[in-house]
Amino acid sequence: MSYYRQSIQAFSVSYLSKLQRRILDCPYFAVNNLNRDFVNTKGFSVVFRRSHLSLVTEQFPYFGRYLEQALQPDCNAFYLNPLLLKAGSRVDPHIDRSLRSYCKTIEPPAMVSVLYVSVPEDLEGGELVLRSRRQQVGQIRPQTNLLLFFQGDLTHSVTAVVKGGDRLSLVCEQYNLENHELEDIPEFKLESRAVAPTAKRKR
């Protein structure tokens, strides 16, 4: 892969519509739990190992088709998050390392996948900018039903949304960890700023 690749019209319209509705109606969907690079955004996050993928799809069945198509076979740990931007939102330049809160030695993900669930036609701004060191290697204008994969070690940002409605995407950081690193990653964990999250690992 040369930095990134794209798949247009990746899913059915009916699936995207259902996915959008379920995400926005989810009780865990709130002001983002991500770091300060994510300005004026909303979402929630699911941390899981591949061994517990079935539990993720049991708790969040509407993520199933996306995960089936997007997850890379050589990756074993994942950080999944819906991400909503609106007018005034932006994401500042960063490299994804969300699992470092559990294991400090983890390197950036092998791959990041992004599905643009809903993008207003009149959207101004909200473009994804990819950089390798100081060189810009991509600038992707989001469009509904575009599935994007990019190298996990790229610095990336989202330009400020100037105009338009909500821009909703589903992002998954995908890691290929050594066994000693994987042991520090939760088998399944929900991260949300919503009051009293109730999604739990069944015993």
Image (cartoon, grey):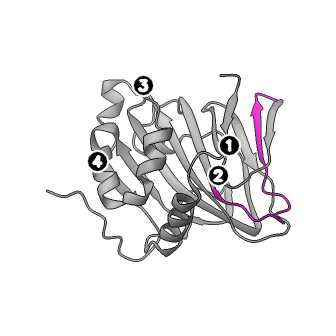
Give the mark nearest the N terminus, 2 or 3. Answer: 3
User: Magenta region: which residues?
Assistant: 117-134
Image spot of residue 92 (x, y percent): 73, 51
- On whether residue 7 falls in the magenta region, the answer is no
Q: Looking at the image, which is closer to me, 172 or 154?
A: 172
Measured Cα–Cα span from mark 3 to mark 1: 24 Å
- Quarter-of-image position of residue 75: top left
| Label 3, residues with CA under 10 Å away: few <14, some 14-19, many ≥20 | few
Q: Looking at the image, which is closer to me, 18 or 180?
A: 18
Q: Which residue has dot 4 on it?
A: 54
Q: Secondary structure at mark 1?
A: loop
> Which of pointers 4 and 1 indicates the residue nearer the eye?
1
Measured Cα–Cα span from mark 2 to mark 4: 24 Å
Q: Secondary structure at mark 2?
A: loop
Q: Are marks 2 and 1 in contact (CB under 8 Å)?
A: yes
Q: Amino acid at mark 3?
A: Asp
Q: Is residue 49 above or below residue 132?
A: below
Q: Looking at the image, which is closer to me, 118 or 176?
A: 118
Q: Is residue 12 above or below residue 148?
A: below
Point 28% across, 47% down: residue: 54
Point 46% across, 33% down: residue: 175
On residue 145, the disc is 2
On residue 74, the disc is 3
Give the mark nearest the N terminus, 4 or 3. Answer: 4
On residue 194, the disc is none
Measured Cα–Cα span from mark 4 to mark 1: 27 Å
Can residue 24 be seen here? The reply is yes
